[in-house]
Amino acid sequence: MDAVSHKGSETVEGDLVMNFEFRLATLADVPEILLLDPMAEREERRYDYVSRSIQGDMGRTVNVLMLDGMIAAFSVVGEFFGHPFLELIATAPNRRRLGVASTLLSHIETGIDDDRLFVSASESNTIMRDLLIQRGYRITGMVENLDPNDAEIFFVIFKVFIDAQLRA
């Protein structure tokens, strides 16, 4: 992943232009990041997970997407069988369904130094599953019994597909 902060803009929702900045998260971002993560309210260990990820634990990187000086989304990218794996992506509630997650996902996809990227989503998370399918991800497997009655579905996208989308 590219560690350099960069800015850009993208048109979403018709005429709305979104001006954004990507950067690596810092420990000072943890409280704001946790406000975006619905699991943080239920899992005290989430603070440790995010903090350790920001510090590079197990090779993880944490990126934030800034809008209007606030963190609008964040992601945690780790490793899965030697390939990049998007472990977590979350968007601020007031920024959902506006293309923010898709913009962050584009940043992650174009920054990978591998031939593929893996992502997972719970079976009940239809919004994320639909986003991944729409972006060209393919279902590559499923793991049951991580959460009761909610299988985890694994997706993959190959760099050649990402590169072809960029050229189109």
Image (cartoon, rainbow, N blue to C red):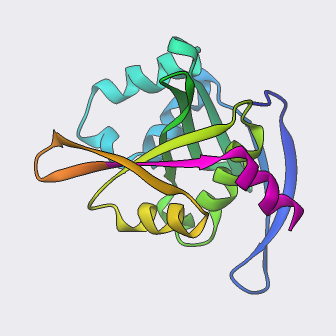
32 part of magenta stretch = no
Query: Exactly how many numbered labels are in the figure?
Result: 0
The residue lying at 33 percent from left, 61 percent from top is 125
Q: Quadrant of the N terminus?
A: top right
Q: On the rendered image, what quadrant is the C terminus found in?
A: bottom right
Residue range in magenta is: 153-168
Picture residue at 61% right of the left edge, 64% below the top: 135
> Does 158 sit left or right of 150 as displayed?
right
Q: Where is residue 71 in the image (x, y as percent from the top left)?
A: 63, 47
Q: In the depicted view, which residue is nearer to us: 91 or 154?
A: 154
Residue 19 in view (yes/no): no
Q: Where is residue 14 in the image (x, y as percent from the top left)?
A: 74, 86
Residue at x 58% of width, y 16% of height: 59
Q: Position of residue 26 (x, y in %)?
A: 64, 24
In x, y percent, where is residue 106? 71, 53
> Depth check: 151 or 2 in front?
151
Residue 24 quadrant: top right
Task: Using the image, determine if residue 164 lies above or below residue 1.
Answer: below
Which is more toward the observer, 74 or 165? 165
Of residue 141 and residue 79, the one placed in the foreground of this image is 141
Q: Does the magenta stretch include residue 160?
A: yes
Is residue 121 positioned above or below 39 on the image?
A: below
Q: Residue furthest left?
A: 148
